[in-house]
Amino acid sequence: MVSLRTLLARPWIWSFFGALLVWLATIAFTGGYGGGGMITAALSLAVFTVIVGVGQMFVITLGPGNVDLSLPANIGLASAVAMKVMDGNDAMIAVGLLAALACGMAIGAVNYLLIWALRIPPIIATLSASFVIQSVDISYGRGLQIKPPPGFADFTNWQVFGIPVLAILTVLFTIGAGIVLQRMIYGRSVLAIGQNIRAAWLAGVNVGRTRFLTYTLSGALGGLDGALLAGYFRGANVDIGNEYLLASIAVVVIGGTSVAGGKANVPGVWGAALFLVLLLTMLNTFGVSVGVRLVLTGLIIVGVITAAGGQKALR
Amino acid sequence: MLRSLLPALSLALVLIAIAWLNPRAISYFGFSLMLNLAIPIALATIAQMFVIAGNELDLSIGTFVGFVGCVTATWLKDAPLLGVVILLGSIGVYALLGALIHLRNLPSIVVTLGMSFVWQGLAILILPKPGGKAPDWLLALMAFKPPFIPFPIIAALLIAAVVHFGLMRTSYGVILRGSGGNSAALKRAGWSLLRTKIALFALTGLFGVLSGMALIGITTSADANIGNGYTLLSIAGVILGGGEFVGGRVSPIGAVIGALTLALAASPLLTFMHIPPDWQVAANGAILIIVLAARVLISRRER
């Protein structure tokens, strides 16, 4: 049995603790009303942050300077691709999902190609790529009014006893990601590169391939997320992924992953995503204005990172 | 050698492209128009350059410029004293952030990410909908029309010269860059890394304030989202200007040239080239990629 002390020593427990605290504060405010519905809503919204958060986590774990800034543009384009391929037809759901995945993977691969060929920092590479992707999306998705196939929209909103099925699947996916990270050669290589890229290379880790796979994985998850978002919100949109740039980085860091690389934390991504979504719900319930909500969100992010602090700086 | 000329070369290339596409643009009036927004972009790029010199990154500079803009268009006009106090206070906040990042060993990316929400929220609280008005003296300054050379060019030269002297030619400038180049050596030599970090962040805050004020002097009124694009523009400007993310290797002159290139490339060039608005963002990305590719080719040849 895990004792309380070892449980508290886990860095990810704090993000869940924060989420719980925010939830309790909200239902205390509403007098216990809507507590369950709030968790259902939080779970269904957190899913989208968790999926891109895991991709971003693998990228950030690669070490100083690695970050994928192309995720929002990627999500936007993939949502349009998915909706166009599915074309409102239930029979095309699988094909549309595959198309969105392929689109995301291609973006990830191009990102790494830029980093490798131009030897530029990933921040600039993914940033320049995101400009280009954004334009492709604006041009490709112009006036796109296609609704998702009814079956797909129902699937993304499907709940069993108040628990979104998508959330259950995402929990399974994150468990898989945890196993890949801790138990498989690829995951160990990512951690090794993040700890010391030169040592990893000398130890025989195929650094280039691992980095390529990681950026492709992040891209693929961005593509998948785009398709699911389009299903959940019933339509594609150029701006659909905008909030996931900050959110994906924030959940990774609040979840206890080291921004210096080499130390990742999968459960923390869930805790942090729930924390952020519940925080937003809480501030909305309190009825604060947009400005106050933004200020508080920012101060809480800075506060959490300061409290968790003490890590090596990112670069 | 060729590498240090690259920022100037890319600017020249953009200018040649403009001259070829529309010769009439190369005139006093044309430059005043095309470089309209060059001053705030150059100031924001310089602001970003200071944190990059210390191996940090500021993802909040865009929303900070927006916040300053909102303060400038409201309090600085209606209650100048209070406005000045708020702007000085916001520079103080930047200095505190530098101290916090150093003392707690925090990743600047995340701290400034959080601060970007704070500045944006404050800006919305000050100015819930677009409006306000720039102080008259600021409008007069930004509308200044010197003979022969358009004001944006003179201002850019002035900014580049002042910052170049301060950061590249003074002894404390060397210390500031050294904090990004080899902080361990600097520490052993007895310099306070806390102080250098505070100084770099305070300078970022100062130039962020100047950028926001210059922007409002041009647009005459403010909007909480007015500066949002500046975060990415400023990072791109520093890199285009030959700066590097690590090692304290930055160039104020290069940064200003990078900012001018971006300002020129942003819309006039693309409109002359008949690139549809859909693809203008892509063209910006492509210009960045091409310049960086050219840089790789040149440094390979020089090795």
Image: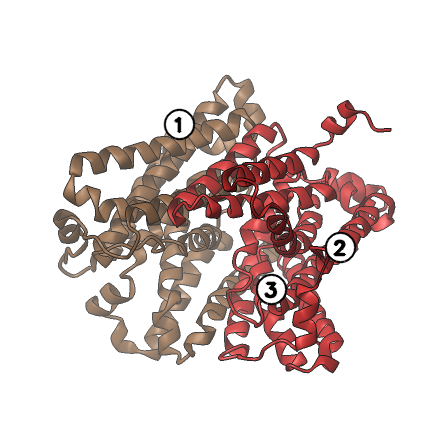
Whole-percent x and y of residue B296?
59, 58
In front of the other: A135 or A157: A157
Chain of the residue displaying label 1:
B
Q: Which chain is red?
A: A
Question: Label 3, label 1: how many angstroms apart (C-alpha)?
Answer: 45 Å
Between circles 3 and 1, the one closer to the viewer is 3
Above or below residue A315? Residue A8 is above
What kind of element bears circle 3?
helix
**Residue denoted by label 1:** B172
Q: Residue B302 sits in which quadrant?
A: bottom right
- Colour in which the image shows chain B: brown
Q: Is residue A97 left or right of residue B299?
A: right
Q: Foreground residue, B68 or B203?
A: B68
Considering every residue shown, the one lying at the far top of the view is B190
Position of residue A41 measured from the top left corner of the image (x, y, whole percent): 61, 54
Crowding near the residue tagged with mark 3, few <14, some 14–19, many ≥20 C-alpha atoms within 10 Å: many
User: What residue sits right under mark 3 in the picture?
Assistant: A75
Residue at horizontal 44 percent and vertical 27 percent from the top: B196
**Mark 3 or 2, nearer chain start:** 3
Residue B192 appears at what percent x and percent y? 48, 20
Cα–Cα gap, marks 1 and 2: 57 Å
Which mark lies nearer to you, 3 or 2? 2
Q: Which quadrant holds the N terminus of chain A?
A: top right
